[in-house]
Amino acid sequence: MLNLLKSGEGFTPPGTKDFDLPSFFNNSPYFTKPILELFLAVILISVFFILASRKAAVVPSKLQFAGESIYGFVRKGLGEDIIGPEFMRFVPFLFTLFTFILVNNLFGIVPLIQFPSMSHVSFPYVLAFFTYGVFHYIGIKKQGFGHYMKGIMFLPGVPKFSYILLTPLEIATYFLIRPLTLSLRLFANMFAGHLLLLVFILGGEHMLMSDAIGLKVVSVFGFSIGIVMTFFEFMVQCLQAYIFTLLTALYIAGALADEH
Amino acid sequence: MNKDENALWSIFGYLLSGLLVWGGVGWALDRFLGTSFFLLIGLVVGAGAAITIIWFRFGRE
């Protein structure tokens, strides 16, 4: 990349290769930036919430207030409002999911880190796998295997012969489409967002480094759009963490409900 | 709000799986029989089935 810029060659647009980050240690795939970010996220979240909850006071400090606001948001907005009376059991899971995804997403715009770990598809897959396991387990435990499967497969109130068309759809939706869309939505948003930032910022850099004075001037626009997009990304990153947790809560609520 | 959001995402999922499942069946039939119309039929049937499910699950309140 740098060589190309120096020799004034054409601009190499950013692509999937920009997501293959080199290993830090011994070429081992376990020591790459995304993996490190996961650990960093765990440490940051733990330290933040331990500090925020250590000296719990009736009149909260700023830190305690921040911690309690996030917790309260997940507990009230995602737990109580959606899951209903049994929500308390699931708050730890939802809260962990939300903060973990949020911090990992925000790494995409934190200076010097600037790489969203969720833009590697395997991480969202694992998170979606947890959600998948939890909501099916809850459903089977609460309703019994037969009743739960019956609720999924046979929609009440439609003519019998239409089950041949509808049942495959229900099965596909519950067992394939749900975990897949859950993980791919998060992955695609983070991937596209990072690529977008790369395009504007690397493009701006390329124009700034070029010999033509006109391009140097125009590079200002590249950088300013890059900055605007960074704020936009901040919004998307928060939203995606919220949607992932919201859908998890909705699926759990669906598995708990006896209505089907 | 809860019901609406639930419906929104579930509807999206059903539409997607309708197209994928029956469209996929149609595509496979086309591939093995050497025809070219089963994919279209599959997509239409899939969308229809998905809309039926949505209608019966969410449209009766």
Image (spheres, coloured by chain):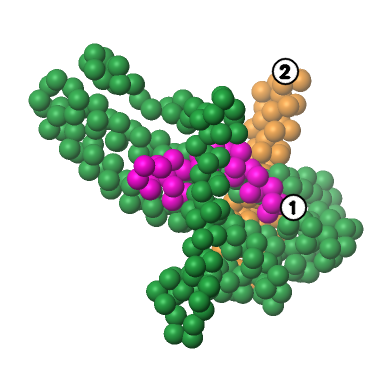
Chain colours: A green, B orange
Q: Residue A168 falls in which quadrant of the image?
A: top right
Q: Residue furthest bottom?
A: A58
Say if residue A110 shows up in the picture: yes
Residue A83 percent coordinates (x, y): 66, 70
Q: Position of residue A14 (x, y in %)?
A: 38, 27
User: Is residue A117 highlighted in magenta?
Assistant: yes
The residue where tag 2 is placed is B34
Residue at left offset 67%, top offset 73%:
A88
Question: Horizontally, is A93 left or right of A109 in the view?
Answer: right
Q: Is residue A138 left or right of residue A23?
A: right
As measured in the structure, the alpha-carbon distance from the residue carrying label 2 to the one carrying label 1 is 40 Å
Q: Is A214 above or below relative to A231?
A: above
Q: Residue furthest left?
A: A213
Label 1, residues with CA under 10 Å away: few <14, some 14-19, many ≥20:
few
Asked if the residue under mark 1 is in contact with the one under mark 2, i.e. CB atoms within 8 Å, the reply is: no
Residue for badge 1: A133
* Amino acid bearing label 2: Gly
Q: Nearer the viewer, residue B19 or A248?
A: A248
Rendered residue at 84%/56% (across/down): A149
Residue toward you, A38 or A70: A38
* Number of numbered markers: 2
Could you tell me which quadrant the N terminus of chain A lies in? top left
Provide the secondary structure element on which disc 1 rests: helix
Q: Is residue A165 visible?
A: no
The magenta stretch spans which residues? A105-133
